[in-house]
Structure formats: C-alpha cells, structure tokens
Amino acid sequence: MAILVVDKITKRFGGFQVLQDVSLKVEEGSITGLVGPNGSGKSTLLSTVFGFYKPDGGDVYFKGDKITALPPHDVYKKGIAFAFQIPRLFFKLTVLDNLLMAARDHVGTTLDGTLFLRKKWKNQELELARRAFEILELLDLSKLVSHKAGELSGGQRKLLEIGKALMASPDMIFLDEPAAGINPVLSRKIYQNLIELKKKGMTFLVVEHKLEVLLEFADYVYMMDSGKILLSGKPKEVINDPLFYNVYVGEAKDVVSG
Ligand SMILES: Nc1ncnc2c1ncn2[C@@H]1O[C@H](COP(=O)(O)OP(=O)(O)OP(=O)(O)O)[C@@H](O)[C@H]1O
Ligand SMILES: [Mg+2]
C-alpha cells in the first residue's frame, strides 16, 4: 500500500516552472530513492510535499488523508519528519539538546503536563534521553554528545540532522542527500540502519546522488529532470536505462552489469 501519494504537483517560482505535474507513490515500509541532476527539482519537491511551499497545482495524500498545502508542523504531526540537505541545527546547543528538542509531544511543554503529570513527564524525559543515546550510538556520534552542534564537521552535522528526524519517531522520513559528505563506510552503516528501521515499518523517501548506495538499498527509484519525473522502477532498471545516462551522467555507458 502506498503511504505517500503525490499527484500532479506543479510549482513555479516567479515565471520559472520548477515542478511540472510530478506524480509518485511511496510504498509503506520502503526505501524509495529520488535521483536527478543538480537543479532538477528534488529538494523543491520534498519541500512542497512537506508544506514549506504551496503547490500551484496537484495534491498530496499521506496514509490516505489529503495533506496538500498543510503547514509543515501539521505534516510533521501527521508523522513525516524531514532531514534537510543543509542541516538545521541549534549551533549553540549541545548535540544531545539538539536531539531532545526534536522529539514530538513533550509532556513537559504543556502546563497540564508540568503541573499534574510530573511522573509521566519524568518518565518521558528519561525515555527520550535513552532514545537520544541510542541514536547517537547508531550514528557514531556518542563521543560528541556534549559538544556544541556548531563545533561539528560538515559530515557530523548531516548525521545529527538525520538523528533529529529519527528522534521524532515518525512513520516516514524525507532524507535529502543523507550520505553527502559522509565517508563510504559510515554511509553504508546509515543505510543498513535504515533497513532495520524499515523492517519495523518505517518508510523513507531519499534524495541520493550515490548510485551504488541506491543499487544496494533502495526498493524503488524515481528519476527527475527539469522538474519532471522521467523514469521509475527498480534501481537496476532505472540505472541501466539509456535515458538515465543521457540525463544524469551525460553519456551512455554500461556500468551496471549482471
Ligand atoms: N526558493 C526558490 N526561489 C527560486 N528558485 C528556486 C528556489 N528554490 C529552488 N529554486 C530553483 O529551482 C530549481 C530546482 O532546485 P532544487 O533545489 O529543487 O534542485 P535539486 O534537484 O534539489 O538540486 P541539488 O541536487 O543541487 O540539490 C533550481 O533551478 C533552483 O535554482
Ligand atoms: Mg537538493
């Protein structure tokens, strides 16, 4: 069953058509990849689906509900989290605090919660801290727990951005180039962990330039160019399509054999 359905989304910035009738489906419990050259509209598509931009046409459905043009915080409440291409961190706060701030539905943020539900509040804070440490372990960031986010390297910031998305325990995560700037070993580890989360039912829509990662880990791939979806299918089918090389690599060659 498709958990996310994007139906003919169109977006213009001024006179510039960035997305043109983009339709795609993401199956529940899948890792679905989105590829395309720089500037083809991948990040704009994720941002429009997530409600940062209002589409000029088309609709978005999540778990069967129409979420077209809902503001991002409502999309987030519905169960989608977004790990951005450029990490959005609180640079003066620690790594741990950045994670804790990303959790959803803190009991302690309501007056009722702080006054009448102290035990529940305390238990929840403990549970969140436990989850944060688990995520830090997963992303190889444990040693940096009390460092300020502003002290992290570019790659470490990307990892923390992914951690923030995981903290929300969403049903689905949009990941915009999660492996960019991260070494190949850690990239694979991250994707291996996505597979584990997938087994628990989580769904991922991932913008990814690293083809070997898509081949190994994606269930299905869409390719965009100039704001349109031109190809879709199993990773191997897409990557071996001559159109893929014309558009994405710029030359036809058979790099994926077998
Ligand atoms: N807020 C904006 N206002 C005007 N034009 C924009 C805006 N955001 C993106 N664009 C333009 O829309 C096009 C698509 O950009 P987008 O960032 O979605 O591409 P992308 O596929 O994510 O590229 P990359 O692989 O480099 O991240 C680009 O030409 C970009 O300049
Ligand atoms: Mg982008």
Image (cartoon, helix red, strand yellow):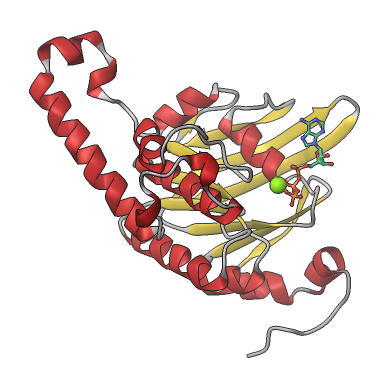
In the rendered image, the residue lying farthest to the bottom is 258
The structure residue drawn at horizontal position 57% and vertical position 52%, both measured from the top left corner, is: 153
Of residues 111 and 196, the one nearer the viewer is 111
In the rendered image, the residue lying farthest to the right is 15
In this picture, residue 108 sits left or right of residue 97:
left
- Quadrant containing the C terminus is bottom right
The structure residue drawn at horizontal position 68% and vertical position 62%, both measured from the top left corner, is: 209
With respect to residue 145, does 48 lie above or below? Answer: above
- Please tell me in which quadrant of the rendered image residue 232 appears: bottom right
With respect to residue 136, does 69 lie above or below? Answer: above
Of residues 237 and 191, the one nearer the viewer is 191
- Please tell me in which quadrant of the rendered image residue 254 appears: bottom right
Of residues 137 and 6, the one nearer the viewer is 137
Residue 171 seen in the figure: no
Residue 219 seen in the figure: yes
In this picture, residue 163 sits left or right of residue 15:
left
The structure residue drawn at horizontal position 67% and vertical position 24%, both measured from the top left corner, is: 54
Query: What percent of the width, then of the height, locates residue 91?
Result: 52, 35
